[in-house]
């Protein structure tokens, strides 16, 4: 069974194998299935190739390759093993090695003529437990460009299966055949760019065993669409929620235009935008359906935290199903204080985006636990966690989980391989493209997220739904426009083809 919608960490994979062993499918059988599956996938993908060279390590990853090589030899293929680190160290990989030796399949310790002649090189030096840096001698071996086809066994050697970080000299695969389930780090960058095409091979782990570890979910478009609210023939606007968006400023008028447009385009019944008069004028031209609430500004065009604005917003918070704060709002002492006021006065779910996040970075305790969605990119997440952007990127999964645990919020950690988590449930989106990397894309996502919250989806499901539809809209847009030409407003236009 191929669990294509599951992703696992290396630690979870270890637990899955332990549980499978306890269920009656022993480690030896799992290695046999893994190696046989690897061989069959190689034959399926490259039926005309005759010469296969396996780079084998001393652990079970190398054992999988010994098994695969044995089955390829049975199919009359030319097979050789290169074992630069010596003989296997685990019992089951030794068994696979012994069978290879009995069948007189060559195992070399240094490259020879076959290294140059092989049509396919299969990397099985390290498995999913790899951390740190590759030895220089192995780096030279792995980065060789003398072979037509490169295939990784389970995960490219030099890649971290948890974080997606890579070592210098990492093996760059055309195809990665991974076992049981895809490893989380393989859809995070930079590792994703070294995996090539990814195929999942079954090693006998049952659905029942997967259910015991709560694997990371890969978002699926059809499943996400099943959660969209039904619109019956006798529907009326109040059934689909009312969003209050506190966003925009004189200097960043477009941010709130994009957010409220995306909000209404994804189904919200009513949207009120509290913003600068100049931003509201832009909204009125673009989206006359939006209700406008002018706020008083300082001399630079940012919101004041005065009694008049507080009274306006306090009254407007009544009977709202979602509150969106931040898109283009700016960060001043006044906007920071106004954000605190809104969080303390609201009782509905809150979506904090962009400058809403930056406004509470120094007072994260103001985040209402259990009714908030945070939408940071890596830099914003770093400010909230008081760590660097680089530290967030080096371990995106744990950064997202820590932020969710710290705030009691659902976290959308944006970027390639966007992560959604409430601290327990975790989902990942591997859709989207580089054309979405422009100012305004996050505003569209924030508006969509607020929309689904207002329509009655729970916070986690709202986040997952918004992220997936946003990413797919980006991919649909990229089918008709070059990456560099794409604009965030094009994503909103593409939503009509998905919803």
Image (cartoon, rainbow, N blue to C red):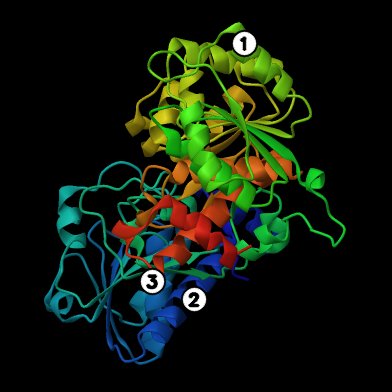
Q: How many marks?
A: 3
| Residue appearing at x 72%, y 56% in the figure | 228
Q: Give the residue number, with chain letter if any, for mark 3.
A: 66
Instruction: Locate residue 289 relative to residue 478 in the image: left or right.
Output: right
- Camera-side residue of 288 and 457: 288
Q: x, y percentage for residue 203? A: 57, 68
The quadrant holding residue 50 is bottom left
The residue drawn where x is 42% and y is 48% is 129
Q: Which quadrant is the N terminus positioned in?
A: bottom right
Nearest to the eye among marks 1 and 2: give it.
Answer: 1
The circle drawn on residue 308 is 1
How far apart are the two marked residues, 2 and 3, measured between alpha carbons? 12 Å
Whether residue 431 is visible to the viewer of this picture, yes or no, is no
Q: Nearer the viewer, residue 209 or 165?
A: 165
Can you say which quadrant of the picture contains the C terminus?
bottom right
Position of 50 relative to 380 (above/below): below
Expressed as whole percent of the image width and height from the top left, the position of residue 476 reads 47, 66
Q: Residue furthest top?
A: 307
Dot 1 or dot 2: first in sequence order is 2
The residue under label 2 is 37
Asked if residue 283 is positioned above or below residue 474 in the image, the reply reads above
Q: Residue at x 18, y 61 (%)?
A: 143
At label 3, counting other C-alpha atoms closer than 10 Å, the crowd grade (few under 14, some 14-19, many 20 or more) is: many
Q: CA distance from mark 1 to mark 2?
A: 69 Å
Secondary structure beneath label 1: helix
């Amino acid at each position: 069974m191929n669990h294509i919608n599951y992703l696992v960490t290396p630690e979870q994979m270890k637990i899955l194998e332990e549980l499978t062993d306890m269920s009656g499918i022993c480690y030896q059988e799992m290695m046999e299935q893994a190696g046989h599956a690897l061989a069959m996938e190689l034959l399926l993908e490259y039926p005309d190739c005759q010469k296969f060279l396996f780079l084998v390590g001393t652990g079970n990853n190398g054992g999988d390759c010994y098994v695969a090589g044995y089955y390829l030899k049975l199919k009359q293929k030319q097979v050789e093993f290169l074992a630069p680190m010596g003989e296997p160290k685990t019992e089951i990989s030794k068994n696979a090695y012994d069978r290879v030796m009995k069948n007189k399949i060559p195992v070399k310790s240094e490259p020879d003529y076959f290294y140059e002649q092989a049509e396919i090189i299969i990397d099985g030096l390290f498995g999913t437990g790899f951390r740190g840096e590759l030895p220089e001698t192995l780096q030279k071996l792995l980065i060789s460009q003398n072979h037509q086809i490169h295939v990784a066994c389970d995960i490219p050697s030099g890649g971290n299966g948890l974080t997606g970080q890579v070592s210098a000299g990492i093996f760059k695969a055309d195809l990665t055949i991974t076992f049981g389930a895809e490893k989380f780090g393989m859809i995070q960058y930079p590792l994703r760019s070294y995996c090539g095409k990814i195929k999942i091979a079954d090693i006998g782990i049952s659905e029942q065993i997967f259910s015991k570890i709560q694997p990371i979910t890969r978002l699926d478009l059809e499943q996400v669409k099943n959660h969209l609210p039904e619109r019956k023939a006798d529907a009326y606007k109040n059934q689909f929620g009312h969003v209050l968006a506190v966003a925009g400023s004189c200097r960043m008028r477009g941010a709130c235009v994009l957010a409220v447009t995306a909000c209404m385009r994804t189904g919200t019944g009513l949207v009120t935008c509290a913003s600068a008069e100049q931003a509201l004028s832009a909204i009125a031209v673009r989206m006359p359906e939006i209700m406008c609430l002018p706020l008083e500004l300082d001399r630079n065009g940012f919101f004041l935290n005065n009694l008049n604005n507080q009274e306006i917003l306090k009254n407007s918070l009544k009977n709202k199903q979602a509150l969106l704060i931040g898109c283009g709002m700016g960060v001043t002492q006044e906007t920071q204080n106004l954000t605190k006021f809104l969080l303390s006065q609201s009782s509905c779910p809150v979506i904090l985006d962009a400058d809403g996040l930056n406004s509470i970075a120094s007072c994260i305790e103001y985040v209402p636990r259990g009714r908030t969605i945070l939408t940071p990119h890596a830099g914003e997440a770093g400010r909230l966690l008081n760590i660097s952007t680089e530290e967030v990127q080096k371990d995106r999964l744990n950064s997202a989980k820590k932020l969710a645990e710290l705030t009691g919020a659902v976290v959308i950690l944006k970027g390639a391989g966007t992560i959604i988590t409430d601290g327990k449930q975790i989902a990942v989106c591997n859709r989207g493209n580089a054309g979405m990397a422009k100012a305004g894309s996050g505003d569209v996502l924030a508006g969509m997220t607020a929309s689904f919250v207002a329509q009655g989806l729970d916070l986690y499901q709202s986040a997952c739904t918004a992220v997936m539809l946003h990413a797919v809209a980006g991919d649909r847009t990229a089918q008709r426009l070059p990456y560099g030409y794409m604009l965030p407003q094009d994503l909103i236009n593409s939503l009509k083809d998905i919803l």
